[in-house]
Image: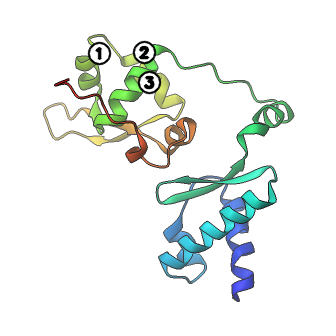
Amino acid sequence: MTRNDLLPAAEAILFAAGEPFEISRLADALALEPEEAAELVDELSARLDHRAGGICLLRLGGKVQLCARPEYSEAVRAALELRRNAPLSTAALEVLAVAAYHQPVTKSYIEQVRGVDCNHVVNSLCQKRLLEEKGRLDLPGRPLLYGTTDDFLRCFGFESLEDLPALPDDNA
C-alpha cells in the first residue's frame, strides 16, 4: 500500500470499527510500525480538523475513534431519535470519582469511602457502561473489582486516567 493510500485506509478502518480502536491494531492492519501508525493518526486528526467537517478524531489512551463533533450532538440526537441521557446524580458522580482514582475497586471499598450502600448506583453505572467489572479480588468471597471504561473517558473528555485532575492534598 502506498503512502497516499494509508491515510484513507486508516480513516476507513476507524469508520468501520465504530468504537475505540487500538493504534497497535491499526499498525498491524496497515503493516506499519506503531510509531508510524501514531503519526498517521496525528495526520488524520489534523486533516479532519482542517476540513472543519462534522467528524473529528477522539483519542482514548492508546485507542482512537471517529466521532461526531460535539457541536453537532443535538442534530445527531434529533436525526437518530436518541433520547437525551439524564444527568448523573451526585451519588453516581461520587462513585465514578472513587472508581476512577482508586481502580480497580470493590463495591465495599466504594461504600466504605462514601459511607452508604452503593449497590444500585454501581449497577446503574455498569448498565450505562461507565463502570465495568475488571476481575475478582483474591480474598474470601472473591468480590468483584470495578473500574471505569472507555465510555467514561469519552463522556468526561479524558484521553486517559492520567488526565484526571489531581486530588487535593490532605495536609493542606
For marks 3 and 1, give the one nearer the viewer.
Answer: 1
Q: Amino acid at mark 3?
A: Asn
Q: CA distance from mark 2 to mark 1?
A: 9 Å
Q: Secondary structure at mark 1?
A: helix
Rendered residue at 81%/60% (across/down): 51
For marks 2 and 3, give the one nearer the viewer.
Answer: 2
Question: Closest to the observer: 90 or 79?
Answer: 90
Residue 114 badge: 1
Q: How packed is label 1: few (under 14 Cα within 10 Å), some, or many (20 or more)?
A: some
Residue 92's place in the image compared with 165, above or below, is above
Q: x, y percentage for residue 37?
A: 56, 74
Q: Please identify the residue farthest to the right as the structure is shown.
A: 79
The residue tagged 2 is 91
Q: x, y percentage for residue 9?
A: 71, 74
Rendered residue at 50%/41% (across/down): 153
Q: Secondary structure at mark 2?
A: helix
Mark 2 and 1 residues: CB-CB less than 8 Å, in contact?
yes
Left or right? Give the position of 3 relative to 133: right
Q: x, y percentage for residue 38?
A: 54, 70
Rendered residue at 41%/24% (across/down): 122
Q: Earlier in the sequence, mark 2 or mark 3?
A: 2
Residue 123 badge: 3
Q: x, y percentage for residue 62?
A: 47, 60
Residue 143 badge: none
Q: Quadrant of residue 120?
A: top left
Q: Amino acid at mark 2?
A: Ala
Q: Quadrant of residue 115?
A: top left
Residue 155's place in the image compared with 40, above or below, is above
Q: Is residue 51 visible?
A: yes
Question: Closest to the observer: 33 or 43?
Answer: 43
Q: Earlier in the sequence, mark 2 or mark 1?
A: 2
